[in-house]
Image (spheres, grey):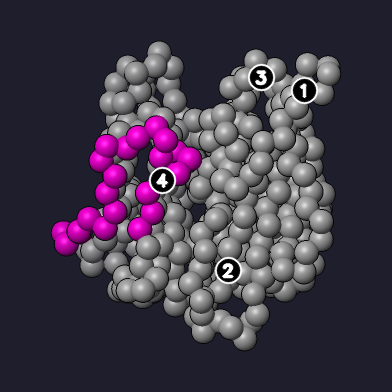
Amino acid sequence: MDCRRAFLFSGFIALFAAGCGGSDTETSGSTDTTTDTGNGTFDARVAVPDPDPAYYDVVSPEVTIESGEDKMLCYHMVIDEEIVADNMEAYQGKFGHHIVVLTAREPQPPGTLEDCTDRKAMTKYGAFMLPDTQLNPGYGLLIPKGSQVVMQIHYINAGAEPELVRDVGRIHKISKDSVTKWVHTMATSDNTLTLPPHQKTHIEFDCEVPAGTELLVAGGHMHERGTRFEMLLGKDAATLESLYLVDPWKTEFRDAPPVSLYFDNPKLIADKSILRTSCDWNNETANELIFPEEMCATFGYVAGTDAPLECQINLK
């Protein structure tokens, strides 16, 4: 599959947490509080922190993830103050895969909780802030007061019993006066991918960057069946050069992928450059795998743009 899409400038904000919580561990920085509730359900709820003026906390509702369930849930909320941020600490329970706070293209009343596991649901959300990725001094992310966002949580319960979960994202606040350059998220994803059983698959897709920008952070995201990931950049398809390569892709990279940092020497992306995302898998299972069981996504931070850069291939 070779597709080309233009980057979409998301109208408000999205918080893209490509760093993941993992198979039987919690998201980085979390403390294991998993206990047996006494009724056959494990209590893996993250403790809600005490109020701290240095942080803005987003907290998911309490939900039960059944044994063997691969589920994404989306919780609609409104940010009630202007936030200038330089990091987000993400905390999940056992079997947590990721926390993502997204823009809502179809806003629902605050407090609405909906199942967003179906890959068609991704068309309803836009892409903002990478978890546990500290911005250098002088850089900042602006979240306007009144932003309507969606906190998405993803769990793959590989345990034998149901799990009660509650996730927390702690957005670290900084002074607006300390910011000399504003940062936004860059994210690409093929949400249509299908991996046939018992065979290898290669997918690549191109995105055109509509305005010159500076790349500060770059990383890739696949799951356990991934074998190779590459991000390429060029002024056109004929001049593409490898910018980020992980070969071979390892299972542990699902939760902690290698990340390239360019804060000290930002990588200039010229106007109308082509950014190619290339993914390879070996599906040795007897089952067809689709998004979000497997993923092909690039994530990063960019500076010099007015909004996040997002390029998604979605089902019609």
The circle on residue 86 is 2
* Left or right relative to 226: residue 14: right
Residue placed most toward the observer, 197 or 137? 137
Q: Residue at position x 29%, y 67% from top?
A: 273
Q: Residue at position x 46%, y 51% from top?
A: 312
253 in magenta: yes
Looking at marks 3 and 2 on the same chain, the residue that comes earlier in the sequence is marked by 3
Residue identified by numbered label 1? 36
Q: Amino acid at mark 3?
A: Ser
Quadrant of residue 160 within the rendered picture? top right
* Left or right relative to 80: residue 184: left
Q: Amino acid at mark 2?
A: Asp
Residue identified by numbered label 3? 67
Image position, residue 246 (x, y; %): 29, 44
Q: Which residues are magenta?
A: 238-260
Residue identified by numbered label 4? 257
Disc 3 vs disc 1: which is toward the camera? Answer: 1
How far is mark 2 from mark 1, CA to CA? 36 Å
How far is mark 3 from mark 4, CA to CA? 27 Å
Disc 3 vs disc 4: which is toward the camera? Answer: 4
Helix, strand or loop at label 4? It is loop
Image position, residue 115 (x, y; %): 69, 36
How far is mark 2 from mark 4, CA to CA? 20 Å
How far is mark 3 from mark 1, CA to CA? 14 Å
